[in-house]
Amino acid sequence: MRIASSLSCLLVTEDQEIFSHCQKDLWERFDVEVLRFNERELKDSLREVRPFLIIWDSRCNPDRWRYFVGWLRDHFLGRPIFALMDGENEAIQNALHRQGIHVQLDIKSPSFFKSLQIHVFAVLLDFEKEKTAMIKVNVS
């Protein structure tokens, strides 16, 4: 039996297949717990969730994505947000980039899950560097 991870990743999606794959893969590779919420549940669950990373499925409520991305930015200050895209849309990609979402992964790509792993690993490395720096400051 495994002890619950101290790190959690928030996955905002309604796609059961993506959730199942992410949950299994990120737990096995990085000991990261993946918490899944859809847009409607997320606002009510904020008190319980302190993720180090947010992965947002842009296919959820595509007409309101600008509002929702702004809402995520406001409520998860300083947390990296990845966008899962359904194909490529240059206008939306540019708009997301302007809002600070620099990691945009195409779920139709054959290398989607591998790319996701690489980006999660990079965020984990940054997270560990920050944690180590904070410990050094507190010890000094």
Image (cartoon, rainbow, N blue to C red):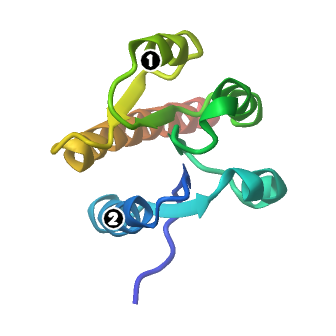
The mark that comes first in sequence, 1 or 2, is 2
Horizontal side, residue 99 vs residue 32: left or right:
right
Q: Which element is circle 1 on?
A: helix
Residue 93 is labelled as: 1
> Can you say whether 28 is above or below 133 in the image?
below
**Mark 2 sits on what residue?**
21
> Can you say whether 120 is above or below 92 in the image?
below
Give whichever of 108, 103 is nearer the camera: 108
Q: Residue at x 63, y 35 (%)?
A: 138
Which amino acid, by three-letter code, is at mark 2? His
Q: Which element is circle 2 on?
A: helix
Horizontal side, residue 3 vs residue 47: left or right:
left
Q: Residue at x 41, y 35 (%)?
A: 85
Quarter the N terminus occupies: bottom left
* Residue 34, image x, y percentages: 49, 61
* Residue 129, image x, y percentages: 42, 33
Distance, label 1 to label 2, CA atoms, is 24 Å
**Label 2 neighbourhood size at 10 Å, few (<14), some (14-19), many (20+)?**
few
Give whichever of 83, 131 is nearer the camera: 83
Residue 59 is labelled as: none
Q: Residue furthest front?
A: 63
Q: Residue at x 33, y 64 (%)?
A: 21
Q: Residue at x 53, y 18 (%)?
A: 96
Label tally: 2
* Residue 75, image x, y percentages: 76, 36
**Label 1 neighbourhood size at 10 Å, few (<14), some (14-19), many (20+)?**
some
Give whichever of 63, 104 is nearer the camera: 63
